[in-house]
């Protein structure tokens, strides 16, 4: 599959089929699922997309996914879903989201 993506030119992250497959695979890696019965209400405002250390990916996949760049997080250097979260959440000073 990787060769097919590259053969048409440089990878841009805008292949809908590939993005959908990656999205489904990566969702299984979530730390916190908003639909889980043990999801705490106070986590709602501490989602990755609102963390100052969350860097959105480029292309269409970047609407939902970004990289964690928080050295104190167990997820540092990993791709994270914008609605996930962790104990190292740090609010953005401007209050913006992803």
Image: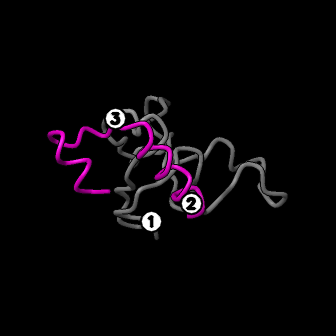
| In front: label 1 or label 3 | 3
Report the side of 44 relative to 98 (left or right): right
* Mark 1 to mark 3 CA distance (whole Å): 25 Å
Which residue corresponds to the image point at 34% horizontal and 56% vertical from the top-left?
69
- Helix, strand or loop at disc 2? loop
- Helix, strand or loop at disc 1? loop
User: Which of the pair 86/4 is nearer the observer?
Assistant: 4
Q: Residues within 10 Å of mark 1 (few under 14, many from 20)?
A: some
Q: How is the image coloured?
A: one colour
Q: Which residue is mark 2?
A: 86
Tag 1 near tag 2, CB within 8 Å: yes
Q: Which residue is mark 3?
A: 14
Main secondary-structure element of the magenta-colored stretch: helix
Report the side of 3 relative to 31 (left or right): left
Residue 13, horizontal then vertical, whole percent: 31, 40
Which residue corresponds to the image point at 52% horizontal and 44% vertical from the top-left?
82
- Helix, strand or loop at disc 3? loop
Magenta stretch, residue numbers: 1-30
Q: Residues within 10 Å of mark 3 (few under 14, many from 20)?
A: few
In the rendered view of the protein, which quadrant contains the N terminus? Answer: bottom left
In the rendered view of the protein, which quadrant contains the C terminus? Answer: top left
Report the side of 71 relative to 24 (left or right): left
Tag 1 near tag 3, CB within 8 Å: no
User: Which of the pair 76/92 is nearer the observer?
Assistant: 76
Task: Check the image and name the residue furthest to the bottom.
Answer: 74
Residue 26, horizontal then vertical, whole percent: 51, 58
Which residue corresponds to the image point at 46% horizontal and 52% vertical from the top-left?
22
Is residue 54 on the magenta stretch?
A: no
Q: Which residue is mark 1?
A: 75
Q: Residues within 10 Å of mark 2 (few under 14, many from 20)?
A: some
Residue 59, horizontal then vertical, whole percent: 32, 34
């Amino acid at each position: 599959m990787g060769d097919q993506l590259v053969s048409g030119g440089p990878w841009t992250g805008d292949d809908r089929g590939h993005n959908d497959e990656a999205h489904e695979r990566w969702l299984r890696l979530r730390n916190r699922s908003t639909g889980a019965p043990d999801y705490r209400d106070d986590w709602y405002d501490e989602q990755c997309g609102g963390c100052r250390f969350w860097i959105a990916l480029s292309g269409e996949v970047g609407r939902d996914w970004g990289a964690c760049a928080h050295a104190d997080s167990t997820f540092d250097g990993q791709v994270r879903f914008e609605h996930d979260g962790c104990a190292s959440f740090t609010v953005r000073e401007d209050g913006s989201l992803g």
